Image (cartoon, rainbow, N blue to C red):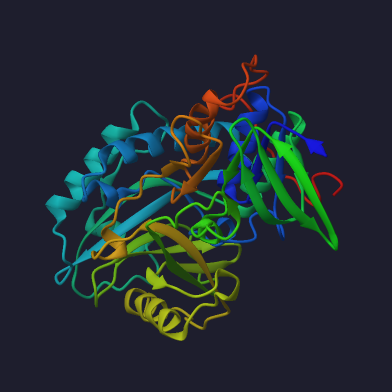
Amino acid sequence: MEETELVIVGGGIHGVGVAQAAAAAGYQVLLLEKTALAAGTSSCSTKLIHGGLRYIESGQIHLVRKNLRERELLLKLAPDLIHRQTFYIPLYHNSSRNPLSVRFGLWTYDLLTGFSKAPLSACLSRSDWSNLPGLQTRGLKAVFSYSDAQTDDAALTRAVMHSACQLGAELCCPARFTSAEIFEDHCRVGYQVGDVVKNIKCLAIVNAMGAWGISMGDRTTPPLPDYPFECIEGTHIECPDNGLTAAYYVESATDHRGVFILPWKDRTLIGTTETPYSGDPDKLIPNQASIDYLQSIYQHYFPDHDARVLNAWAGLRVLPQASSSPFNRPRETVISVNDPKNPRFVSILGGKLTGYRLTAARVIDQLQGVLPLRTAIADTAQLKLTRVEGKLQPD
């Protein structure tokens, strides 16, 4: 039987982040991905590396601070994958937020960023509104600017996995995870490559399957309880390029949710929605109501732009179950272990693209009780990330 030290299931940003962190820490790592890297949620995000401005409003200051520091680090580590982007927040007479509260939120955002090269937020003078082509000016009261960053989420995921492979991690893709047996001193993972069923012995397993990994009871021995989390659908649409050079953070006129309007690969990207989803993650498609919702927001703020929907796609984020709106729920990543005294099966629940590296470090910390002592061979805070195309290594 094959042997390794750590098996990671799931090739999204969190799975590859753990692979990189584990390999940098000197461990033998195998990552299993059933279709392709970033095939799920990690290619269906809003493509942002950001602190999460709206989380200030809900008091998640610690989360915002961590992600802003990570944003600045990732801009240095992946300059050809991540770039700064200017964002505008237009406020109207019927906006739910007033200029003073937005100004205070942006001031807090600047403060939490710390010392960096990021441009400070500002309130645009009325004479500068003409530099925002297409934006609805009827009822416009104020426009604020701030800075965040944008990325190609799938390309970033591949770059992190490439870094992990350079450090010795192995990638098996496509490979379907079928079972996990958890013993006192080791684990056994079953997986399938084509028609071939394989087994590998390891010291620990990381469940980085996201929406596909909430329910694990039928695949683990002993059975693990279902996690008290639910899937939330996030739909995005792509409309024709209408000359946007900056991004906009706007408020839905119907439910006051925040929605981004962004330039993206010669198109305009609008998203996202947050709708509970209870179906099969493999059968997720954007529903028409979500598409119409996003298109109407775009037309509301840019009435003269071509709002034809050229493409629509959806991803699933994992959030704690609650009666409150998904928009207002905590976004902190939850690291769940099967047994705190013998943590051989660790699950990553929720989390943000920006904070993947910090999440990976937390996972490695959780596993220290079952992994042997190793001398680190690299520091992920210093590893450059470069764009890669095609397969990272042979299956």
Q: Is residue 40 above or below residue 368?
A: below
Evaluate whether residue 152 shows in this view.
no
Q: Provide residue 209's location: percent of width, then percent of height.
A: 57, 54
Name the residue nearer the viewer: 389 or 135: 389
Name the residue nearer the viewer: 99 or 290: 290
Q: Quadrant of residue 20?
A: top right
Q: Provide residue 288's location: percent of width, then percent of height.
A: 46, 85
Q: How many labels, in total?
A: 0
Quick check: 188 left or right of 221?
right
Identify which residue is drawn at 72% across, 51% down: 190
Quick check: 3 left or right of 255?
right
Identify which residue is drawn at 63% across, 55% down: 38
The quarter of the picture where the N terminus appears is top right
Evaluate whether residue 74 shows in this view.
yes
Q: Provide residue 304's location: percent of width, then percent of height.
A: 40, 81
Q: Provide residue 355's location: percent of width, then percent of height.
A: 46, 40
Q: Quadrant of residue 18?
A: top right
Name the residue nearer the viewer: 337 or 67: 337
